[in-house]
C-alpha cells in the first residue's frame, strides 16, 4: 500500500493513511473503510483517499465498489501511474477473480480469460507509460502475465522491477514462483533471501512451502505452511495454502478412481502420516474430515465388478468341461494382462506428470 501513497503531502492524508494501515494490520478492514469514508466526506476530490478506498474494498471482496473508487481516483489524477495501478488491480479483481475462475496458475489460459483480463493489462501498460520505473506496476503486470502463462513476459517485468528495487520482496517471490517447476533450488534461494529480510512474511513462507514440496520435502513443506498459519491465524491465504498442500501431499482417495488407484493412495497416505508428528496428524485429519469421502460408486467400478462376478459364476455352467480349464486359463491371462497394462499406464502417467510439473 505504501507505494500508492508515497507522494502524500498533507498531514491529514498521512494521518489517515497511518490509521488505515494500522486497522488493516489488525484485521479490521470495515473500520478502515469507515475511516476512509469520513476522510472522503472532508476531501472528496483527493485521489489518494479514493485509491486507498479501492484497495480496502478489494480486501473486503467488494470488487465492484473497489472498481468504482479506482475509476474516481483515475478521473481525479489521470496522469499518475499509481492511480492506473490501483485501477488495474480493481479491474482484475472484478473481471477475473470476481468471476470465480481458477486462481491457480494454469498450464494454458482458460477460454475467455485473455479477453476479460485485457483492460487490467492495458491499465498497467498505461501506468508504465506514465512512469517506466514504477516498481508496483511492473510487479502487478508480471503477476497477471504469469497467471496467463505468459512466462517470458512475466520474467522480463520482474527483472525490470528488480533493476529499480533489487530487494523488492514481491518481485523476488514472483520470480521464485516462476522458476519453481524447473529450478526449485533457485526458487528456494530467492525465497530465503526474502525471509532473511522479513522472517514474518506469510507470503514468502507459502512460496517456501511450495518449493519444499517440489523438492520432495513433504513434511518440511507442511511444517512451513502450518507455521505461516500460526504466525497469522486470520490470514485466509495462509489457511488456503496449508489446505492445498495437505490435499497434494496427503490426498483423500477419489471416488472417481478405480479401487486399485485409491488403495495405493490410501497405503501411501498411511505411510506418510506415520512419519508426521502427533500435532500435524491432528491438523491433517481435521482437513480430511472436511472433504467428501470416497463412495466407490463410480459406474466403471460397478460395471467391472459385475462383469467379473458374472463371468466367474457362469463360466463352469455354459462352457463344456473339456474347454473349461482352457477358458479359465485364458481368462486369467487376460486379467493379468489388463493388470500389467494398468500398472505401466499408471507409472507412465506419474512420470509424465512429474516431468511436466
Image (tube, rainbow, N blue to C red):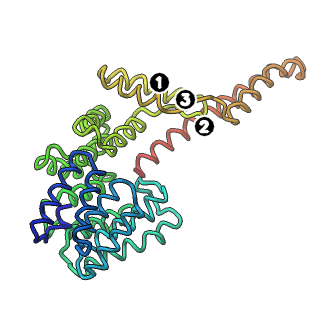
Residue that numbered label 3 is attached to = 293
User: How far apart are the alpha carbons under marks 1 and 2?
Assistant: 17 Å
Mark earlier in primary sequence (1, 2): 2
Vertical arrangement, residue 17 with respect to residue 205, above or below: below
Tag shown at residue 66: none
Q: Outermost residue, front direction?
A: 42
The image position of residue 350, as x and y in percent, is: 47, 42
- Picture quadrant where residue 249 is located: top left
Distance Cα–Cα, label 1 vs label 3: 16 Å
Cα separation, mark 3 vs mark 2, equals 11 Å
Q: Secondary structure at mark 1?
A: helix
Mark 2: few, some, or many residues within 10 Å (few <14, many ≥20)? some
Question: Pointer 1: what residue?
Answer: 267
| Mark 3 or 2, nearer chain start | 2
Residue under pointer 2: 256
Question: Taking 76 as reference, is 36 above or below it?
Answer: above
Asked if residue 148 lies left or right of residue 218, the reply is right
Q: Nearer the viewer, mark 1 or mark 3?
A: 3
Q: Nearer the viewer, residue 81 or 318?
A: 81
Amino acid at each position: 500500500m505504501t507505494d500508492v501513497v508515497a507522494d502524500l503531502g498533507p498531514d491529514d492524508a498521512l494521518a489517515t493513511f497511518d490509521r488505515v494501515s494500522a486497522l488493516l494490520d489488525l484485521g479490521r478492514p470495515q473500520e478502515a473503510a469507515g475511516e476512509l469514508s469520513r476522510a472522503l466526506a472532508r476531501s472528496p476530490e483527493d485521489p489518494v483517499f479514493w485509491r486507498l478506498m479501492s484497495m480496502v474494498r478489494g480486501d473486503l471482496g467488494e470488487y465492484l465498489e473497489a472498481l468504482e473508487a479506482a475509476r474516481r481516483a483515475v478521473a481525479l489524477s489521470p496522469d499518475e501511474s499509481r492511480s492506473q495501478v490501483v485501477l488495474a488491480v480493481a479491474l482484475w479483481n472484478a473481471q477475473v477473480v470476481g468471476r470465480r475462475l481458477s486462481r491457480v496458475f494454469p498450464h494454458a489460459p482458460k477460454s475467455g480469460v485473455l479477453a476479460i483480463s485485457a483492460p487490467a493489462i492495458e491499465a498497467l501498460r498505461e501506468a508504465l507509460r506514465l512512469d517506466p520505473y514504477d516498481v508496483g506496476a511492473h510487479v502487478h503486470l508480471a503477476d497477471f502475465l504469469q497467471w496467463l502463462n505468459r512466462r517470458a513476459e512475466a520474467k522480463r517485468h520482474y527483472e525490470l522491477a528488480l533493476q529499480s528495487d533489487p530487494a523488492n520482496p514481491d518481485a523476488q517471490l514472483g520470480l521464485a514462483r516462476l522458476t519453481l517447476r524447473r529450478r526449485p533450488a533457485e526458487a528456494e534461494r530467492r525465497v530465503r533471501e526474502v525471509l532473511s529480510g522479513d522472517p514474518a512474511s506469510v507470503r514468502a513462507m507459502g512460496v517456501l512451502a511450495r518449493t519444499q514440496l517440489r523438492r520432495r520435502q513433504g513434511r518440511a513443506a507442511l511444517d512451513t505452511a502450518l507455521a505461516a498459519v500460526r504466525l497469522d491465524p486470520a490470514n485466509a491465504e495462509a489457511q488456503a495454502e496449508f489446505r492445498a498442500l495437505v490435499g497434494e501431499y496427503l490426498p483423500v482417495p477419489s471416488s472417481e478412481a478405480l479401487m486399485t488407484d485409491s488403495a495405493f493412495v490410501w497405503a501411501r497416505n498411511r505411510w506418510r502420516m506415520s512419519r508426521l508428528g502427533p500435532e500435524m496428524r491432528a491438523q491433517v485429519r481435521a482437513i480430511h474430515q472436511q472433504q467428501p469421502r470416497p463412495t466407490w460408486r463410480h459406474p466403471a467400478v460397478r460395471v467391472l465388478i459385475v462383469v467379473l462376478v458374472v463371468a466367474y459364476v457362469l463360466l463352469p455352467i455354459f462352457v463344456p468341461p473339456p474347454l473349461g480349464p482352457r477358458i479359465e486359463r485364458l481368462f486369467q491371462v487376460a486379467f493379468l494382462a489388463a493388470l500389467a497394462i494398468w500398472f505401466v499406464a499408471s507409472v507412465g502417467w506419474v512420470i509424465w506428470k512429474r516431468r511436466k510439473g
